[in-house]
Image (tube, rainbow, N blue to C red):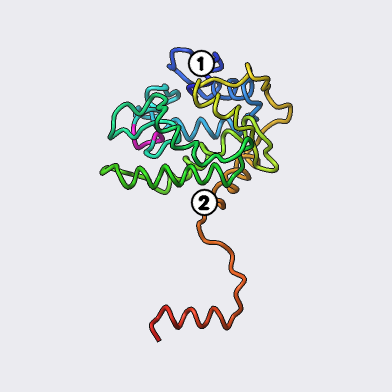
Amino acid sequence: MNTLANHGFLPHDGRNITRNTVIEGLSAALNFNASLASLMFDMAIVVNPEPNATFFTLDQLNKHNLLEHDASLSRTDAYFGNNHVFNETIFEETKKYWTGPTLDANMLANSKLARQISSKAYNPTYTFTSSMEQFSLGEVAAPIIAFGDIQNGKVNRTLVEYFFENERLPTELGWSRREEVVGLVDITGVTQMISNATNLITPSKESRASRRRDLHSGLGF
């Protein structure tokens, strides 16, 4: 949302962001369809504590442990200081897991897991609920959805780095809004790719007898 405000697709001052503003802004910036943009507004409006609120602000989005959460790919945890601005040290940690010029679901998932482990280890107030996990998966999937190959779950690393470091769309690098309209099925597809890639258990090719032997061993028999 900050990036869209920086480009003027949302109000520059970050105030009075209404449903229509979100629908128009996400369509103009990223070619999201109206139903997807409306759903994203519904997810964001919870940050406004006013009853029956019809708008939210960027400041409200930054309130910790609502939508903003620990273990960001590019910002420090609130416990350690300013969690609203880009943090180069944190981002360098994230990029260690981006091991090629084209990022895929595995690389992005690895960086997500690494940031969560680091945060859990060093932040005594670490909080990461199941709803935050879903929001985090969407955030990690976002670069693929915005700049990459949605079907194959890949994206140019240079575009992603520019996006994080500048909080701007990478138009200066030749990127342009995709021609295909983006819908909920696209979001859920890429999010599922990331979710699957966070699983640390690999498929087993062992025989049934081998599995039975391992089970008995594990039980101490």
Image quarter of residue 122: top left
Circles 2 and 1: CB distance less than 8 Å?
no
* Residue corresponding to mark 2: 198
Give coordinates of residue 133: x percent, y percent: 45, 45
* Residue corresponding to mark 1: 6
Image quarter of residue 89: top left
**Going by the picture, which residue comes out furthest to the bottom?**
221
Residue 189 versus residue 161 in the image, above or below:
below
| Number of other residues with Cα within 10 Å of mark 2, as a class: few under 14, some 14 to 19, many 20 or more | some
Which residues are the magenta region? 64-68
Magenta-drawn stretch, dominant element (helix, strand or loop): loop
Residue 189 versus residue 174 in the image, above or below:
below
Residue 95 or residue 181, whichever sits in front: 95
Residue 134 or residue 146, whichever sits in front: 146
Determine whether, in the image, residue 99 is placed left or right of residue 75. right
Residue 127 inside the magenta-drawn segment: no
Determine whether, in the image, residue 66 is placed left or right of residue 202. left
On the rendered image, what quadrant is the C terminus found in?
bottom left
Label 2 to label 1: alpha-carbon separation: 31 Å
Residue 66 inside the magenta-drawn segment: yes
Instruction: Name which of mark 2 and mark 1 comes first in the sequence.
Output: 1
| Number of other residues with Cα within 10 Å of mark 1, as a class: few under 14, some 14 to 19, many 20 or more | some
Give coordinates of residue 213: x percent, y percent: 50, 83
Query: Which amino acid lies under the numbered mark 1 shown in the image of this protein?
Result: Asn
Give coordinates of residue 149: x percent, y percent: 69, 37
